Structure formats: C-alpha cells, structure tokens
Amino acid sequence: MFAYIKGTLETKSNTYVVVDVNGVGYKIFMSLKAIEKVGEIGKVVKIHTHYYVREDNISLYGFTTIEELRMFELLLSVSGIGAKSAISMLSEITPSNFALAVITNDISKLVKIPGIGNKTAARIVLELKDKLKTDVGVDLSSEQKENDNSLINDKTSEAISALQVLGYTRRDTEKALEKIEIDNLEIEDIIKQALRLLSK
C-alpha cells in the first residue's frame, strides 16, 4: 500500500520514528540500526515501508534501503517469524551478510542473533533457499559443481546467488560484478560493493 514515505522527521525513539507528511504524522517502526542512520530531526527523510496487517495489528515498518525491506519481507515468509522478530534481526545482521548466510548454509552466523536458535536458523535457511530456487531458478549446488576448479568463479557464483536472495536479477548482478575487481576481495565485500552499484 505504501512503497515509501517522504516527509519531515519529527520524532525518533528506540523502536520507531514519526514522519510528518503534510500535517499527518506516520508512526513507522524500524530497527535500532536504521533509526540511528535515518537522519536528523527536522530534516526531510525518505523511508521505504512495509504495510503490515494482521487481525489485531496494523502497523508500518520502515527501512533505509530496499535491501533491508526485502530481507524483512523474506523473513516474514518464514513460518514462525513475525514482524518484531524480523525487525530485531535487522539490528543484528546486514542484508548482505544475511543473504550470504542463507546461500552458504551458515547457521552459526544466524544463531548469533538474539532470539534465534538452531531450529529457527535452520528453518530460515531451508525455506529461503527453496524460495530462491523457485523464484529465480538458481540451482546453487549445480553452479558450485560447475565452478569447482575456480575460486574466482565460486566467489562470483555465491555473490550472484546472495544478491538474488535480496531480489536482484541475475542479469543486473552480473553487470554490477563486472565493475568490481573480485580477485582479492572477500565475498561479503564483493556483495557490499555490488549493492552500492545496484542501488544507484
């Protein structure tokens, strides 16, 4: 319903902000990390939003980047993960690290997040990897096999898969990666640089 809200930042708390748009104040729940970097009170801000509707709750959740919004919506698609859990996870792990954890089955990275145990972490990885294969037609295991003999190709394959978790097309991610010298970079740094290029 609301793709984003742009207006004057009126209030900042630990869990939400209030943005004034033509005299109407929108209360938007955000992660602590997002609240810290959203901007200064009195300044005009643009916040990407998710309109969350349940029988007993109608709320707006906000994000400073499209990647954060996509990660939030992915987490909501996992059984047992609610809006509060998803928004708290955004305070503990970046979208790039989250996507990398999913495509590499790195459950240990997810269980470091408060409130996420082994079972929940395993469910996140299982359900989102299956969703990735369904949505974008990527068979991660076959790609890994094809690239066994090349570390650079393995890096590229993992980076592409992680970016696709965040909703980018394979074509767009490949174009972004062509502009990055990946030889001496770690996967996380490759993904972060690609995200900067893709968000322009």
Image: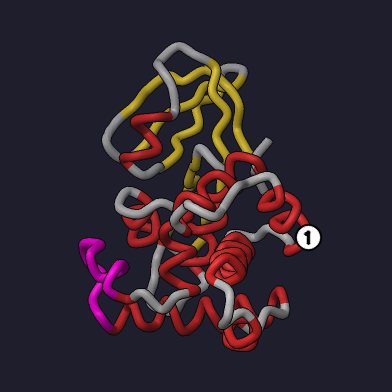
Image coordinates for residue 113, horizontal then vertical, percent: 25, 62
Position of residue 170 relative to residue 120, above or below, is above
Q: Residue at x 65, y 84 (%)?
A: 146
Q: Nearer the viewer, residue 97 or 51?
A: 97
Color theme of the render = secondary structure
Amino acid type, residue under disc 1 in the picture: Arg
Image coordinates for residue 45, horizontal then vertical, percent: 54, 23
Left or right: 116 as drawn, with respect to 71: left
Dot 1 falls on a residue whose secondary structure is: helix
Left or right: 51 as drawn, with respect to 36: right
Q: Nearer the viewer, residue 112 or 160?
A: 160
Position of residue 64 relative to residue 76, above or below, is above
Image coordinates for residue 169, horizontal then vertical, percent: 73, 61
Image coordinates for residue 87, horizontal then vertical, percent: 38, 53
Q: Is residue 128 visible?
A: yes
Q: Residue at x 49, y 42 (%)?
A: 62
Secondary structure mainly formed by the magenta segment: loop
Residue density around tag 1, few if under 14, some if 14–19, many if 20 or more, within 10 Å: few
Magenta segment: does it hold 117?
A: yes
Residue position marked by numbered label 1 in the rendering: 171
Magenta segment: does it hold 83?
A: no
Q: Residue at x 63, y 64 (%)?
A: 160
Q: What is the magenta range? A: 108-118
Look at the image and tell me in which quarter the C terminus lies.
Answer: top right
